Image (cartoon, rainbow, N blue to C red):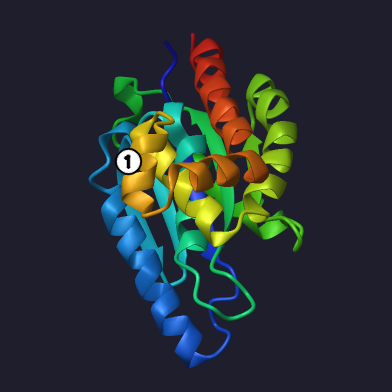
């Protein structure tokens, strides 16, 4: 299997709209990122936070990097306050293959991946919240289009729908009884949230993406 890393470069959406909004927004983001460090399945190597609202996440194994991106956005949306603009983050995802040969051990393995992800965020249209870039044609062709649709679905989630989706991603399964206990919602309500929000389709896509990543790396 080929060596590769995923990088997610993110910027909190409208985080500077007033002090009363900005401070709890940043604290919510820091809490989410700190929690992610302890989630083994994401294979996070490092999280860097700059300016408080700009961050980069490096993953040693990209198998779950789409799950991570969707979780991050869904979790932020679920923590939104009651003002008009909900919490969210603009995310640029990149994948790069890495040569771990002895000749390169003194270099930054991740330099190209960081640059690719950062430039992707800079070039992202203002009405886009999530994009994907890779210099490897198979990866770009497989994920660039589907992620645009995924971006629209996640951005359309309500707070309750986003909460349900974030819990499903962490548990890696759809268990309505457990979701009801964790979200304090009835099982009937969970079913309605999942059906109306496209949550089942997002979960199915994430499962497909992991199989596709495994195929592309083989």
In-front residue for pair 177/142:
177
Residue occupying the point 31% across, 64% down: 31
The percent position of residue 47, horizontal first and vertical second, equals 34, 53
Query: Which of 90 and 154 lies nearest the eye of the viewer?
Result: 154
- Figure quadrant of residue 177: top left
Location of residue 183 in the rendering, given as x and y in whole percent from the top left corner: 38, 52
Residue farthest to the bottom, as pictured:
19
Above or below — where is 88 with respect to 44? below
For the N terminus, the quadrant is top left
Q: Residue at x 45, y 55 (%)?
A: 75
Q: Residues within 10 Å of mark 1 (few under 14, many from 20)?
A: many
| Observer able to see residue 111 | no
Name the residue at 71% across, 32% down.
Answer: 146
Total label count?
Answer: 1
Q: Is residue 155 above or below residue 66?
A: below
161 or 202: nearer the viewer: 161
Question: SS at mark 1?
Answer: strand
Camera sees residue 161: yes
- At 76% from the left and 61% from the top, the residue drawn is 127
Q: Left or right of 195: which side holds 42?
A: left
Whole-percent x and y of residue 111? 46, 43
- Residue that badge 1 annotates: 44
Rendered image quadrant of residue 82: bottom right
Residue 128, image x, y percentages: 72, 55
């Amino acid at each position: 299997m080929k060596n590769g890393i995923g990088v997610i470069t993110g910027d909190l959406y409208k985080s500077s709209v007033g002090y009363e909004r900005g401070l709890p927004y940043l604290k919510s983001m820091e809490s989410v990122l700190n929690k992610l460090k302890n989630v083994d399945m994401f294979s996070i190597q490092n999280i860097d936070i700059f300016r408080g609202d700009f961050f980069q996440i490096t993953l040693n194994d990209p198998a779950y990097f789409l799950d991570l991106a969707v979780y991050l956005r869904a979790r932020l949306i679920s923590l939104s306050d009651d003002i008009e603009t909900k919490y969210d983050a603009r995310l640029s995802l990149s994948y790069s293959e890495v040569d771990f040969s002895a000749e390169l051990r003194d270099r930054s393995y991740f330099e190209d991946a960081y640059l690719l992800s950062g430039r992707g965020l800079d070039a992202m249209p203002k009405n886009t919240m999530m994009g994907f870039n890779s210099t490897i044609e198979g990866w770009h062709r497989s994920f660039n289009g589907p992620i645009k649709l995924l971006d629209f679905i996640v951005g359309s989630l309500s707070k309750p729908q986003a909460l349900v989706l974030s819990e499903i991603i962490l548990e890696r399964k759809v268990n309505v009884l457990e979701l009801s206990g964790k979200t304090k919602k009835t099982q009937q309500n969970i079913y309605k949230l999942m059906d109306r929000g496209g949550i089942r389709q997002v979960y199915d896509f994430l499962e497909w993406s992991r199989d596709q990543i495994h195929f592309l790396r083989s």
